[in-house]
């Protein structure tokens, strides 16, 4: 097993180093994520009582809050890696943003779906044009646009540049969806139940403990999935380079000197 | 097994569908990530063997 010594974060901008470190970390992250997500969801679904107001719909919180949290945080992670790409031109950071987007869009979709399912019995409607809900929907559309832009542009560096700019713009909605309730004192959506900064949570311990485990689990699941997907992106890029090299060699006329023979003549 | 199933009362449909939809999406994401990773790794291994870098 390769040992991982503490090094500068920029060391991992080297794809080879990243593959080495992520290959070591991935199994641990996967096991930890599976353990936390399963514990949080099984505890939340099977072993928590009904809420006196919400009844059994309170069990949806164990999916809705962690997925909404990750939907915003994944975009903020993409913002950081996009800025690193724009400033330092590290390919791994651009690929990290690209790899994170499908995870973010899934988390946003889960948050929107579970919110709508919870909203029908509690608010009497699946959807309202509430500031937080609307900014979340826009964030979802930004995720789709971001992924479509990556897919539409063949040159990977150009795609990384343009998607990074889109990510900067979309960050406004990621932050807006987080703080919309504070900005506009209107709408149906309540404020944050678990404010990390103040610690004044409104959730009872009976629900908070499995919720916290589920939130940690979703965070670890993101780490495991993003590592797996970045590794795939790095391999896909290397595969693309090898195939392009093969095509160049195949297109070369038979009489043309190969790089090896050219160096022999020199 | 059913003894452990919680009594969800009149919101059983909402709660169950929220879990079913979310788990389908999560498993779909995990499966897609894993399958795509395996496919690219296999193709890269094949290409590296072809060009002789492995």
Image: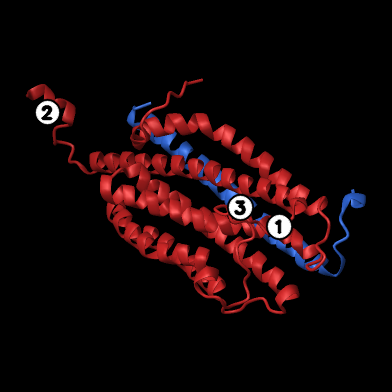
Q: Earlier in the sequence, mark 3 or mark 2?
A: 3
- Reading the image, the residue beneath label 3 is A199
- Where in the figure is residue A28, as x and y percent of width and height? 58, 32
Q: Please tell me which residue lies in front, A167 or A160.
A: A167
Mark 3 to mark 1: distance in Å?
11 Å
Mark number, residue A262: 2
Q: Colour of chain A?
A: red
Say whether residue A16 is left or right of residue A21.
Answer: left
Colouring convention used in this rendered image of the protein: by chain
The chain to which mark 3 is attached is A
Chain represented in blue: B
Disc 1 vs disc 2: Cβ atoms closer than 8 Å?
Answer: no
Indicate the secondary structure of the residue bearing disc 2.
helix
Q: Residue furthest left?
A: A266
- Residue located 87% across and 66% down the image: B9
Q: For residue A142, what is the image quadrant?
A: bottom left
Which residue position is annotated with label 1?
A203
Horizontal side of residue A257 vs A249, given as left or right:
left
Q: Quadrant of the C terminus of chain A?
A: top left
The answer to whether residue A240 of the structure is visible from this angle is no
Q: Which of these two is toward me, B45 or A133?
A: A133
Task: Tell which of A30 and A234 is nearer to you.
Answer: A30
Residue that appears at 51% across and 20% down: A1
Q: Residues within 10 Å of mark 2 (few under 14, many from 20)?
A: few
- Closer to the camera, B31 or A20? A20
Is residue A167 visible in the rendered image? The answer is yes
| Chain identity of mark 2 | A
- Dot 3, how many residues are within 10 Å of its Cα: few (below 14), some (14-19), or many (20+)? few
Asked if labels 3 and 1 share a chain, the reply is yes
Could you tell me how many numbered marks the image carries? 3
């Amino acid at each position: 097993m390769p040992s991982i010594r503490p090094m500068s974060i920029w060391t991992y901008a080297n794809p080879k180093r990243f593959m080495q470190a992520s290959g070591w970390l991935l199994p641990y992250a996967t096991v930890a994520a599976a353990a936390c997500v399963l514990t949080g969801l099984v505890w939340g679904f099977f072993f928590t009582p009904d809420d006196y107001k919400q009844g059994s719909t309170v069990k949806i919180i164990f999916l809705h809050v962690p997925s909404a949290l990750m939907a915003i945080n994944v975009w903020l992670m993409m913002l950081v890696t996009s800025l690193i790409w724009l400033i330092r031109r590290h390919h791994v950071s651009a690929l990290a943003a690209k790899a994170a987007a499908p995870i973010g869009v899934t988390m946003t979709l889960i948050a929107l779906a579970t919110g709508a399912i919870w909203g029908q019995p509690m608010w009497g409607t699946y959807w309202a044009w509430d500031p937080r809900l609307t900014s979340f929907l826009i964030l979802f559309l930004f995720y789709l646009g971001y992924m479509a832009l990556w897919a539409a542009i063949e040159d990977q560096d150009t795609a990384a540049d343009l998607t990074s700019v889109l990510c900067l713009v979309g960050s406004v909605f990621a932050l807006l969806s987080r703080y919309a309730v504070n900005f506009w004192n209107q709408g149906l959506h309540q404020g944050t139940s678990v404010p990390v900064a103040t610690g004044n949570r409104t959730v009872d311990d009976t629900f908070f403990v499995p919720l916290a485990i589920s939130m940690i689990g979703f965070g670890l699941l993101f780490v495991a999935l993003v590592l797996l997907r970045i590794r795939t992106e790095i391999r896909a890029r290397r595969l693309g380079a090898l195939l392009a090299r093969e095509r160049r060699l195949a297109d070369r006329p038979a009489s043309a000197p190969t790089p090896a023979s050219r160096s022999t003549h020199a | 097994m059913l003894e452990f199933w919680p009594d969800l009362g009149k919101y059983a449909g909402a709660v169950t569908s929220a879990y079913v939809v979310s788990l389908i999406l999560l498993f779909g994401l995990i499966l897609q990530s894993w399958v795509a990773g395996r496919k690219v790794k296999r193709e890269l291994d094949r290409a590296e063997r072809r060009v002789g870098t492995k």
